Amino acid sequence: MEYFAKRIIPCLDVNDGRVVKGVNFVNLRDAGDPVEVARRYNEEGADEITFLDIGASHEGRDTIVDVVKKVAKEVFIPLTVGGGIRKLDDIYNLLNVGCDKVSINSAAIKSPDFINQASKRFGSQCIVVAIDAKKVGKSWNIFLNGGRIDTKIDAIEWAKEVEDRGCGEILLTSMDADGTKAGFDNQLNYKISSQLGIPVIASGGAGTMEHMRDAFRVGGADAALAASIFHFREIDIMDLKRYLRDQNIPVRIDG
């Protein structure tokens, strides 16, 4: 629905308490302290912030609630947190320290009914399902544990299922494009966004303002998420929003 403002979302991938960024989910480099980075994005005009504890599911531990609490105190825009969420109490603990939405991935695949339970208890608007998809042959499969395990599940069919189960939004990452700065996989984005009634956040591959524009115009996304172009100040968020506005893409610009 075109009249809704499109959202720009910086993503903080956090590992061992630091913001990191990799290419195709590997070769991580340090991008700073999560509290400082989040504060900067709040000031620079981001619409939301997504905070992903990228080692949590792989290492089988809980999300770092104490860091989330510190970040939530510094930001006044919606904060989504993911990584290591396996039970309803995990969601409660995160919402309780100030995050607005939670992103679930591995737990949803391993126990799809978890989506139903979570959306029923906390409301669909709180529940984001993250899908890490990679092209396999002519289709896209979803992967688990930071891209380490191919589930053999079709990404498009899974996206439809999670919507049916009550998820309020999908965070769709193309693993092929992730960190490459070569552009989003808008074929994948459109295949999913065009078949769903819930918002889709495009993730993986942002390198230029044109890529962000195309995520909306070609991929049909409702929000575009990026990490390194913002972390390393290659693109300023307000400059990006002005560019998108000039391209007739509706965005929120205060002032």
Image (cartoon, rainbow, N blue to C red):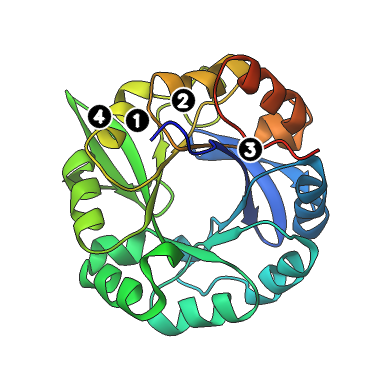
> Circle 3 sits on which residue?
227
Neighbour tally class for label 1: few under 14, some 14-19, many 20 plus, Cα within 10 Å: many
Mark 2: secondary structure: helix
Mark 1: secondary structure: helix
Q: Which mark is residue 189?
A: 1
Neighbour tally class for label 4: few under 14, some 14-19, many 20 plus, Cα within 10 Å: some
Q: Residue at x 47, y 34 (%)?
A: 3
| Type of amino acid under label 1 | Asn
| Type of amino acid under label 2 | Ala
Q: Quadrant of the C terminus?
A: top right
Q: Residue at x 79, y 30 (%)?
A: 233
Mark pair 3, 4: CA separation:
23 Å
24 lies left or right of 87: right
| Type of amino acid under label 3 | Ala
Q: Is residue 208 visible?
A: no
When the figure is inspected, residue 214 is found, relative to residue 59, above or below; the finding is: above
Mark 4 and mark 2 lie on one chain; the one further toward the N terminus is 4
Mark pair 2, 3: CA separation:
15 Å
Asked whether the residues under the numbered discs 1 and 4 touch, taking CB atoms below 8 Å apart as contact, a structural biologist would say yes
Question: Which residue is more in the foreground, 138 or 15?
Answer: 138
Asked whether the residues under the numbered discs 2 and 1 touch, taking CB atoms below 8 Å apart as contact, a structural biologist would say yes
Q: Nearer the viewer, mark 2 or mark 3?
A: 2
Q: Quadrant of the N terminus?
A: top left
Mark 4: secondary structure: helix
Mark pair 1, 4: CA separation:
6 Å
Mark pair 4, 2: CA separation:
12 Å
Q: Which mark is residue 215?
A: 2
| Type of amino acid under label 4 | Lys
Q: Which mark is residue 191?
A: 4
Mark 3 and mark 4 lie on one chain; the one further toward the N terminus is 4
